[in-house]
Image (cartoon, rainbow, N blue to C red):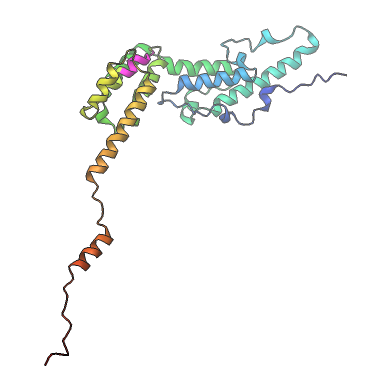
């Protein structure tokens, strides 16, 4: 006899953070990344339909056979509660308190989070565009922090459907450089086609490292060689004539 009691793959997930390592927060630009990782996980474990914005609680997935209906409804409810717990387990406590609603389905909770991060898109886009255009290297301690800010603001713009092209990110990267990186900035701007953002970032990091080594060489005074000092002292040691005991 065939065994019909199969365990749904979603029930084998012991820790959702192994699949969605990002914690979604209200003031962080990670919604797109978080939602994409979450959907990938749901697809892999066969529960993507629980994120669909439907109020039928998966009725389309339930058999019309009366013998199976109650079992399928119970399984659907368990899976929906599981996906909901995954959502709650990958968002911050502040965000959870903001959007929590008792008795909500996974789909409704998913939609509320999406709306929370994508409301007032036009005004948020204008504000973020101003921030993006004013990013300057002088306001950061190093190239890595500077590049990260450009990427961060670009991600936030993508969250409000104002995606920043890779070429625009590279141009802003060049525009915001200071005089210390004028030469490499000019080189980047004249590439045809432009390098990718990550290629430009790597070139700038290498230039930063090179300049740092040059500065160390210019300011480093090597310690005196002790052997040379010893030799020099010996060669300049005064000699004393030996007494002549044979003289009258």
Residue at 59% x, 28% y is 16
In terms of depth relative to the viewer, which is nearer, 44 or 50? 44
Location of residue 139 (image quadrant)? top left
How many numbered discs? 0
162 to 140, vertically: above or below? above
Instruction: Work out whether residue 141 can be spotted.
Output: no
Residue at 68% x, 27% y is 12
| Residue 112, image x, y percentages | 50, 17
In terms of depth relative to the viewer, which is nearer, 217 or 121? 217
Left/right placement of residue 82 relative to residue 30 reads right
| Residue 85, image x, y percentages | 59, 26
Residue at 51% x, 15% y is 111
25 to 63, vertically: above or below? below
Location of residue 167 (image quadrant)? top left
Task: Pick out the residue farthest to the left.
Answer: 248
In terms of depth relative to the viewer, which is nearer, 145 or 103? 145
| Residue 203, image x, y percentages | 34, 26
Left/right placement of residue 247 relative to residue 192 reads left
Task: Pick out the residue farthest to the bottom.
Answer: 248
Picture quarter with the C terminus: bottom left
Magenta stretch, overall SS: helix
Residue at 30% x, 17% y is 171
| Residue 184, image x, y percentages | 27, 25
* Residue 168 part of the magenta segment: yes
In terms of depth relative to the viewer, which is nearer, 87 or 248? 248
Instruction: Work out whether residue 212 can be spotted.
Output: yes
Picture quarter with the N terminus: top right
| Stretch of the chain drawn in magenta | 163-170
């Amino acid at each position: 006899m065939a065994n019909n009691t199969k365990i749904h793959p979603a029930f084998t997930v012991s820790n959702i953070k192994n699949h969605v390592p990002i914690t979604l927060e209200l003031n962080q630009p990670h919604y797109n990344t978080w939602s994409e990782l979450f959907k990938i996980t749901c697809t892999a474990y066969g529960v993507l339909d629980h994120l669909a914005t439907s109020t039928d609680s998966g009725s389309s997935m339930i058999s019309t056979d009366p013998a199976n209906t109650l079992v399928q409804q119970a399984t659907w409810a368990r899976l929906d509660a599981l996906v909901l717990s995954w959502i709650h387990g990958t968002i911050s406590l502040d965000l959870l308190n903001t959007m929590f609603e008792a008795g909500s389905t996974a789909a409704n909770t998913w939609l509320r989070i999406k709306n929370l991060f994508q409301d007032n898109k036009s005004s948020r886009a204008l504000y973020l565009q101003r921030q993006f255009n004013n990013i300057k290297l002088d306001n950061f301690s190093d190239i890595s922090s500077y590049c990260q800010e450009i990427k961060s603001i670009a991600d936030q713009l993508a969250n409000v459907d104002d995606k920043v092209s890779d070429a625009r990110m590279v141009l802003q990267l060049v525009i915001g450089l200071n005089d210390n990186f004028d030469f490499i900035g000019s080189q980047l701007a004249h590439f045809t086609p432009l390098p990718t953002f990550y290629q430009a970032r790597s070139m700038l990091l290498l230039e930063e490292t090179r300049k740092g080594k040059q500065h160390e060489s210019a300011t480093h005074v090597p310690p005196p060689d002790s052997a040379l000092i010893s030799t020099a002292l010996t060669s300049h040691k005064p000699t004393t004539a030996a007494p002549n005991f044979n003289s009258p």
